[in-house]
Image (tube, helix red, strand yellow):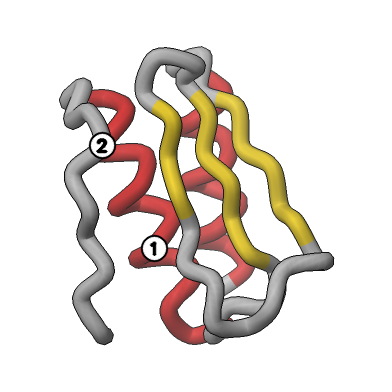
Amino acid sequence: MHDVLAYLMNYAFDHDIGVIYDSTLPASAPPVSFVKQRLVIMNANFRESEQPFALAHEIGHVMLEHYRIHCNAPA
C-alpha cells in the first residue's frame, strides 16, 4: 500500500499539486482538495486501507478542476 501512496504523491508533485498529511485531525475528518490552490489535505488518521483511493480521488478533483462539490459519501 505504501508503494501506491508513494506513486500518488510523486504524481501529485509532478503535476504541481501539494499534498499535506495532517496527523492532528480526528479519524472521521475526510481528505479535502483545494482546486485553486492545487492542494490536497490528507488526514493521516483516516482509514489506512482507504488512503490510496482517497488521495487519488482528491488529486482527480484538482486535475479536473472540480470546484468544491461535496463528496462525503461513506466508503
Label 2, secondary structure: give it: loop
Which residue lies under the disc numbered 1? Answer: 54
Left or right, 4 with respect to 60, comes to right
Q: x, y (%) of residue 70?
A: 22, 53
Q: Which badge, 2 or 1, comes first in the chain's sequence?
A: 1
Q: Are marks 2 and 1 in contact (CB under 8 Å)?
A: no
Location of residue 51 with respect to 4 vertically, above or below: below
- Identify which residue, 56 or 21, lies in the foreground: 21
Q: In this view, does 10 lie above or below 44?
A: above
Residue shown at 52% from the left, 39% from the top: 40
Residue sitting at 36 percent across and 46 percent down? 58
> Does residue 40 lie above or below 56 as drawn?
above
Which of the 4 quarters of the picture holds residue 67?
Answer: top left
Which x, y percent locates residue 47?
54, 85
**Amino acid type for the residue under numbered disc 1:** Ala
Q: Position of residue 37 (x, y in %)?
A: 50, 16
Residue at 60 percent across and 27 percent down: it is 18
Instruction: Say which quadrant the N terminus sits in.
Output: bottom right
Residue 62 located left or right of residue 13: left
What SS does tag 1 mark? helix
Disc 2 target residue:
68
Q: Which of marks 2 and 1 is in front?
A: 2
The location of residue 19, given as percent across then percent down, is 61, 37
Residue pictured at 26% horizontal, 25% vertical: 63
Classed neighbour count for the residue bearing mark 1: other residues with Cα under 10 Å, few (<14), some (14–19), many (≥20): many
